[in-house]
Image: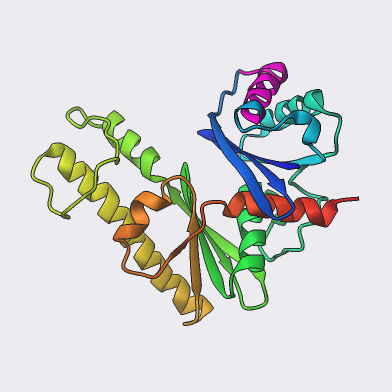
Amino acid sequence: MIVAVDIGNSNISIGAYSGTGLLFLSRISTNNDATADEYAVKLRHIFDLNGHTAAEMEGAIISSVVPPLSPRLFQALKLLKDVRVYTVGPGLKTGLNIKIDTPSQLGSDLVCVSVAATEKYPVPAVVVDMSTAITFSAIDSRKSLVGCAITPGVELSLNALAEGTAQLQKIDLDEPVCSVIGHNTIESMRAGSVYGNAAMIDGMIARFREELGEDLCVVATGAQAAVILPYCREKVMYDEHLLLDGLRLIFEKNRK
């Protein structure tokens, strides 16, 4: 069993693979104050909940956009079983040709989704990762990552709107949006957020297509993708496990 851990700003995703098959996926809240021991306890409980044990681990790999937590999750995994644990970063083989000004500055999450996309989908491609931030990773016809675009995520924008105004409240997007025209404050905020982000994604895809080619493949992942994609007019494939699949692929490229 290979364990893949994605440390995000809001949540930590834990996936376990047997070969290429995903055994389970669990998520916990990112806690910057939790110790390695506390994370080890959480990981053990997650294994138990899914009918597995830490003894089954053959290795693990971590991607993190919260650098202080990387060593704590590394240690937590080691506490459960002394296996090889990789952390995505400079020096780790990915097989991805990164053509940006400073490759070492590229977020490990973008590396992982791009590695998975080049293995699973035709190129040229754009990978839209809709998490705390929305990122667009551009992969050319030679499977090279040539650049990215980054914009605030759906929930981040909604929270900023509520915190920066006196009369707008925090809302969720659980209910479907039927019209771009809201008939009360909450409906209007939902319409603006859902249709606004969908239109932004459509517009960005059109602009990426101008630079990468008409045969552009677009794949999206991330917590908010399932909420926004139904309102997009462009064809976008949804791949919930893209980042974790990328972690598994990178682990296999470095396995000794």
Q: Quadrant of residue 186?
A: top left
Quarter of the N terminus within the rendering: top right
> Residue 36 is drawn in which quadrant?
top right
Residue 108 in percent (x, y) is at 66, 48
Please tell me which residue lies in front, 22 or 32: 22
Left or right of residue 42, residue 193 in this image? left
* Viewer can see residue 153: yes
Look at 86% across and 51% down and name the residue there. Answer: 255
Q: In the image, is residue 45 part of the stretch drawn in magenta?
A: yes
Nearer to me, 209 or 94: 94
Q: How far across and down, in percent of the image, does residue 196 sit?
A: 28, 54
Residue 81 lies left or right of residue 200; in this view the side is right
Magenta residues, dominant SS class: helix
Rendering coords of residue 20 (x, y %):
70, 55
Taking 244 as reference, is 174 above or below it? Answer: above
Residue numbers of the magenta segment: 34-47
Q: In the image, is residue 206 part of the stretch drawn in magenta?
A: no
Q: Position of residue 98 (x, y in %)?
A: 70, 63
**Residue at horizontal 65 percent and vertical 26 percent from the top:** 48
User: What residue lies at 62% left-to-right and 67% top-to-bottom?
Assistant: 120
Q: How is the image coloured?
A: rainbow
Q: Return the residue nearer the eye: 174 or 207.
A: 174
